[in-house]
Amino acid sequence: MYRVLKPNGYILVNFMSIEDDSFGLGKEIEKNTFIGSREGEENIPHYYTDIDELKELFKRFREIEIFKNEYRFSIDSINTIKSRMLDVIGYK
């Protein structure tokens, strides 16, 4: 991301937090990466991280902001998914 970002550009990305209720569920295929942890997404790998790892991953950026957020998505009129995310803004 850093390499292709224009000078003075910024990015906004989000990551599943290890504080999410689905962390550790399903089959671990790599460290902090699970499949089968969310209904309807059984074959989709989900990677979970924390703030310290994100600081390391984004250390080349001149500035980063990390926000803990919780999003709710309605599947239907009865069911809702709650996701605890880490939103990152990186400034080159």
Image (tube, rainbow, N blue to C red):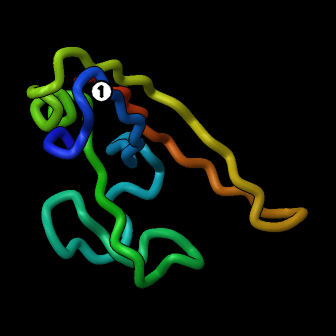
Residue, x 25% and y 64% (percent of image)?
33
Q: Residue 34 placed where, x, y %?
A: 30, 69
Q: Name the outermost residue toward the top.
A: 63
Quadrant housing the C terminus = top left
Identify the secondary structure beneath mark 1.
strand
Q: Residue 36 placed where, x, y %?
A: 41, 78
Report crowding for label 1: few under 14, some 14 to 19, many 20 or more residues within 10 A (C-alpha): many
Query: What's under tag 1, amino acid-wise?
Result: Gly
The residue closer to the viewer here, 79 or 10, is 10
Q: Is residue 47 above or below residue 12?
A: below
Q: Is residue 19 above or below residue 92?
A: below
Quadrant housing the N terminus = top left
Q: Is residue 84 above or below residue 76?
A: above
> Where is mark 1, residue-wise?
90
Q: Name the outermost residue toward the front.
A: 6
Q: Residue 76 placed where, x, y %?
A: 83, 67
Q: Residue 72 placed where, x, y %?
A: 68, 46
Q: Name the outermost residue toward the right.
A: 77
